[in-house]
Image (spheres, grey):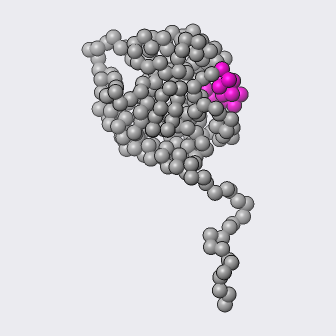
Amino acid sequence: MLKIGEHVFQSRLLLGTGKFDDLEVQSQAIEASGTEVLTFAVRRLNLEERNKKHFLDMVDLDRYTLLPNTAGASTAEEAVRIAELARASGLCDMIKVEVIGDGITLLPDPIETYKACEMLLHKGFTVLPYISDDVILAKRLQLLGVHAVMPGASPIGSGKGIMNPYNLEVIIEQAVVPVIVDAGLRSPSDAARAMEMGADAVLLNTAVSGSGYPVDMAKAMRLGVEAGRLAYEAGMIPVKRYAAASSPAEGMIHT
């Protein structure tokens, strides 16, 4: 089970709802992914525009936990205002803190992210910060009391996969809360690799919504996550410098 704060999930795949061209395809992809957590940008969803369809109209909200995010925020104060808007709408007390510090790389601002998390924790939110693969920031945020950390594998939407496996491995190794690898994953093998490293979950958006067939890709990602987790739990053989015979020589008949 994946436990984040007071929330418990069976699926270890979190799915973003942005960038889908068609709400019906989005709904089918959500189903195929097996996810239990849907994330979305609060600033892109006008909850008062009921004459305009959005993804909330297409999913059974009793089956999913919503994870609003603060995309669009560039300061801690902006992020907190967006989070409070989401909570006031009755969506969820869980929030993905996203404070972007650079418009080119879309990398998160570590200082503003830390400040936002501190403020939101004081307000009683379940806080999941999106960060770069910064080992020290991940540690500091956990000491602060966040409920999960979400390091990026590579820049948002880049499809570059896991660019710095060493940092991710250290973050995972030292973690006392769930580590959810977020951003930059492209393929089921990327998702499987993150899970094989010991990540607790992955969050995907562009890799699914931007693929040729999002429903098929959602299923493929689901299988990749499941396979990677099973491999991690089973325990993979150590890497050796030289070959090791799969059939031992002892007991063989010599001719």
Q: Is residue 18 visible?
A: no
Residue 89, relative to residue 222: is it above or below? above
Question: In the current view of this chain or complex, which residue is farthest to the left?
Answer: 51
Instruction: Tell me, yes or no, whether the highlighted magenta stretch contains residue 126.
Output: no
Q: Position of residue 77 (x, y in %)?
A: 57, 9
Asked if residue 252 lies left or right of residue 31, the reply is: right
Reply above or below: 161 against 238.
above
Q: Position of residue 190 (x, y in %)?
A: 54, 44
The number of callouts visible is: 0
- What residue lies at 66% left-to-right and 17% top-to-bottom? 111
Image spot of residue 136 (x, y percent): 71, 28
Q: Position of residue 26 (x, y in %)?
A: 35, 32
Which quadrant holds residue 73? top right
What type of secondary structure mainly makes up the magenta span?
helix
Identified at 53% across, 21% down, the residue is 126
Is 113 left or right of 27, judged from the image as shown? right
- Name the residue furthest right: 241
Question: What's drawn in magenta, residue-wise?
Answer: 131-144
Q: Is residue 139 above or below residue 52?
A: below
Name the residue furthest bottom. 255
Tell me the residue at 69%/66% (across/down). Answer: 243
State the quadrant of the C terminus: bottom right
The residue closer to the viewer here, 171 or 20, is: 171
Q: Is residue 137 magenta?
A: yes
Q: Does residue 40 appear in this view?
A: yes
Determine which quarter of the picture holds residue 23: top left
**In front of the other: 245 or 71:** 245
**Residue 204 located left or right of residue 162:** left
User: In the rendered image, which quarter is residue 178 located in?
Assistant: top right
Residue at 32% from the left image edge and 33% from the top image edge: 27
